[in-house]
Image: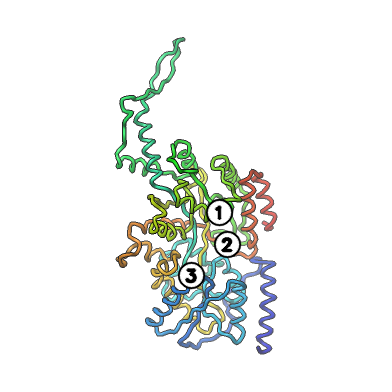
Amino acid sequence: MNLEKKLVAIAFVALMTILTIFGSKMELKKPEEQESILPSWTEDTDTIHIWYSDESLTDYLTAAATAFSDAEGVHVIPRLVSQSEYLENIYRESIEDGVLPDCYILSNDQLEKAYLTGLAVEVLDPSGICNEQSFSKGAISAVSYHGRIIGYPMSYETSALLYNRDYLREWARQQLIKEATTGEEVFTQDENGEAESVTTTNTGVEAFEPEDADIERYLSENFPHTMNDILNVADGFDAPEGVEGVMKWAVKDIFYNYWFVGNYMIVGGDAGDDGNNIDITNDETVQCLEFYESLNQFFSIEADSVNYESVIKDFEDGKIIFTIGTTDVISRLEEAEREGILTYDYGIARIPEISDELKSRSLSVTNAVVVNGYSKEISLANRFATFIVSDYAGELYDWTGKVPANPYVYPYADNGRDEGRISAGDSAQFVTFSEEYADSIPLPKMMKTGNFWVNLEILFSKVWKGADVSEQLSELSEAIGA
């Protein structure tokens, strides 16, 4: 390594240390200032490299590279690397004599660090797809940083409500029978001549059995859209044998809890990049967490003995009616159906509101294709990144089980795909997740909030066990200097 590169490497280590300490408090350079410190290469070659750290992407990226090569005559070489010190290793390869990645896959919460160290630049967007006409607001917010789009949305994770549709049909049936066998309220006189109300019983319809169409209509009109609705289901349902609880979810994992406060706990704004826009102690957040705390007495979930895997297994086995799942659950439940483990009808719905007054909002994480600012092939890298998230995005789910961020490709619609793939009817499950993702709050990308999520997970755990909500929020606010 020559002296100039050694000095740059030393500067990078120093910069990474500064960024870790001060995070997004650093003054953001203007685009022309940032670009001036990067190599100004213009010569194109016929080969580009893409790095990734998720092994499940190997077959997909290999197939995409082949398809792009056939279409564009460009040789693309995917490389699986360790997640450990991922960005640091990309930087070292970028300034040393190794083979640098021209583009790479990165979670949206790492984009600030990538941008401020020159490892990500504003996209060229050669096909004009990085907008809310081609992607949802949630996707564009996830890859935006101070008004600039610095990545192409590829896939995402967010949460939705899973429900056992067979059990809910039975609940609807029971409600219809109750309505049919409960007479009208009439007024009579008691022994003192005072008026009193009496609800009569229609004994003549004790054998009433609702039609399937009536059950479906009732369920459609009375589907639980809030947590209060779910509590009403729990209160008025004679659950079948084998049901151990109405609702259970991974209360120890912040990803499955954040929707309780996501609409009111502000951490960097919609794009998660504004260090001056943090508000986690407002009245609405307090109310949401107090409601969350009250749920322990209804569901009695032992936080330390429940995790996502165990909850989904309970759902597959028909032990619970509702749970919270992420996009990975679609392929998992499909497999359970094929193996005969899951034998009932189920559905996926939007995350319930907290109540009629308090709204919910899911958390999301977006994996993006990022162009390396040190690449000699920035134009080609942008073209391949565009190809991955648009032309070839419809292949992502079949190869990886990951759901594409592009809402206009398979599996959101069948689009005449070959037999054996998911049916057009089943695609509604993907659409539900896509709608949830569109309204979600992306995982913030500010480095100053790096420990925030660990601390927030601890807060939820303490609140679930009865800790004072206001006190816990104040401690969290102080911990991140908000």
Which tag is nearer the camera, tag 1 or tag 2? 1
Q: Which mark is residue 251?
A: none
Q: Is residue 423 visible?
A: yes
In the displayed structure, does residue 219 sit left or right of residue 232?
A: left
Mark 1: few, some, or many residues within 10 Å (few <14, many ≥20)? Answer: some
Snapshot quadrant of residue 238: top left
Q: In x, y percent, where is residue 480?
A: 67, 58
Mark 2: few, some, or many residues within 10 Å (few <14, many ≥20)? Answer: many
Q: How many marks?
A: 3
In the displayed structure, does residue 239 sit left or right of residue 309?
A: left
- Does 450 appear above or below 230? below
Query: Farthest top residue?
Result: 192
Q: Which residue is mark 1?
A: 307
- Does 163 appear above or below 26? above
Q: Gap in Å between the C-alphas at discs 2 and 3?
A: 25 Å
Mark 3: few, some, or many residues within 10 Å (few <14, many ≥20)? Answer: some
**Callouts 2 and 3 close, C-beta under 8 Å:** no
Label 2's element? Answer: loop
In the displayed structure, does residue 21 sit left or right of residue 30?
A: right
Q: Gap in Å between the C-alphas at discs 1 and 2?
A: 24 Å
Q: In x, y percent, where is residue 79?
A: 51, 78
Q: Which residue is mark 3?
A: 56
**Disc 3 residue type?**
Ser
Q: Is residue 379 visible?
A: no
Q: Which residue is mark 2?
A: 444
Label 1's element? Answer: loop
Q: Residue at x 58, y 74 (%)?
A: 82
Q: In x, y percent, where is residue 462?
A: 64, 48
Mark 1 or mark 3, which has the lower sequence index?
3
